[in-house]
Image (tube, rainbow, N blue to C red):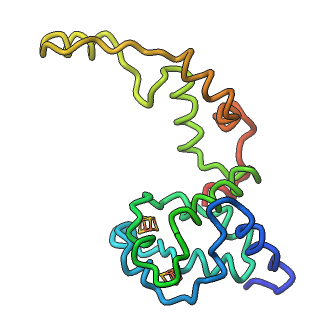
């Protein structure tokens, strides 16, 4: 059970002040977004309407530490159908940005940052891959980790890698 003292009434304003989150207060909980969502078809744990409702109620820690904000595939189906122009896809990005700032980064994303840093891409390209490409008449792919690592560094993303402080246990929920 959640005590009222655990609620953060300022959370909705924090989201509304984050780029992409400006329209959160327009939601009237119709559920059109959830009915439009392809992720919802795969898992009924996921509901954009529920995420917005929880955020409006001030369930800050529950929203930021949950894995379901990371399940959005940014398909924009909800965005196009919302009668209140809540712009849910951007709204979820705003919540993700707040989550990252507060140290809630899913382990899978940390691994991806490390792969980008080390290989310049999300999969390692080895000699075998390039030999197969040569057999197929395709040009070799060369990893360029230095350039990508620089982008990660300049954007601050590199700090989210697994080498950065580990997330709290709750983050993996
Ligand atoms: S479709 Fe729009 S108004 Fe309806 S629940 Fe989703 S965000 Fe709220
Ligand atoms: S943008 Fe995200 S929340 Fe909206 S319908 Fe697509 S997967 Fe679902």
Residue at point 53%, 70% (across, down): 87
Residue at point 65%, 62% (across, down): 95
- Viewer-closest of 71 and 32: 32
- Viewer-closest of 135 and 77: 77
In the rendered image, residue 2, in percent from the top left (x then y), is placed at 75, 83
- Viewer-closest of 168 and 103: 103
Q: Is residue 1 above or below residue 71?
A: below
**Is 56 placed left or right of 39 in the picture?**
right
- The mark tally for this picture is 0
Residue at point 46%, 84% (across, down): 83
In the rendered image, residue 132, in percent from the top left (x then y), is placed at 19, 15
Q: Is residue 137 above or below residue 113?
A: above
Looking at the rendering, in which quadrant would you find the C terminus? bottom right
Looking at the rendering, in which quadrant would you find the N terminus? bottom right
Q: Quadrant of residue 68?
A: bottom right
Q: Quadrant of residue 34?
A: bottom left
Residue at point 60%, 49% (across, down): 106
In the rendered image, residue 92, in percent from the top left (x then y), is placed at 57, 64
- Viewer-closest of 134 and 68: 134
Outermost residue, left side? 136
**Is 127 placed left or right of 93 in the picture?**
left
In the rendered image, residue 11, in percent from the top left (x then y), is placed at 77, 72
- The reply to whether residue 104 is in sight is yes
Q: Is residue 143 above or below residue 24?
A: above
- The reply to whether residue 61 is in sight is no
């Amino acid at each position: 059970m959640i005590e009222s003292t655990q609620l953060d009434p300022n959370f909705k304003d924090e989201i509304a002040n984050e780029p992409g989150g400006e329209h959160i207060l327009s939601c009237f909980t119709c559920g059109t977004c959830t009915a439009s969502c392809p992720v919802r078809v795969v898992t009924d744990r996921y509901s954009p309407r529920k995420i917005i409702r929880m955020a409006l109620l001030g369930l800050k820690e529950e929203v930021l530490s949950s894995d379901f904000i990371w399940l959005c595939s940014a398909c924009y189906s909800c965005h196009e159908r919302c009668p209140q122009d809540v712009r849910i896809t951007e709204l979820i990005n705003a919540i993700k940005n707040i989550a990252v700032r507060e140290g809630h980064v899913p382990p899978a994303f940390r691994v991806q940052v490390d792969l980008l840093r080390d290989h310049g891409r999300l999969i390692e390209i080895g000699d075998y891959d390039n030999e197969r490409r040569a057999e197929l008449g395709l040009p070799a792919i060369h990893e360029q980790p230095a350039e990508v690592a620089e982008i990660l560094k300049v954007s601050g993303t590199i700090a989210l890698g697994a080498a950065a402080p580990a997330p709290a246990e709750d983050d993996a929920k």
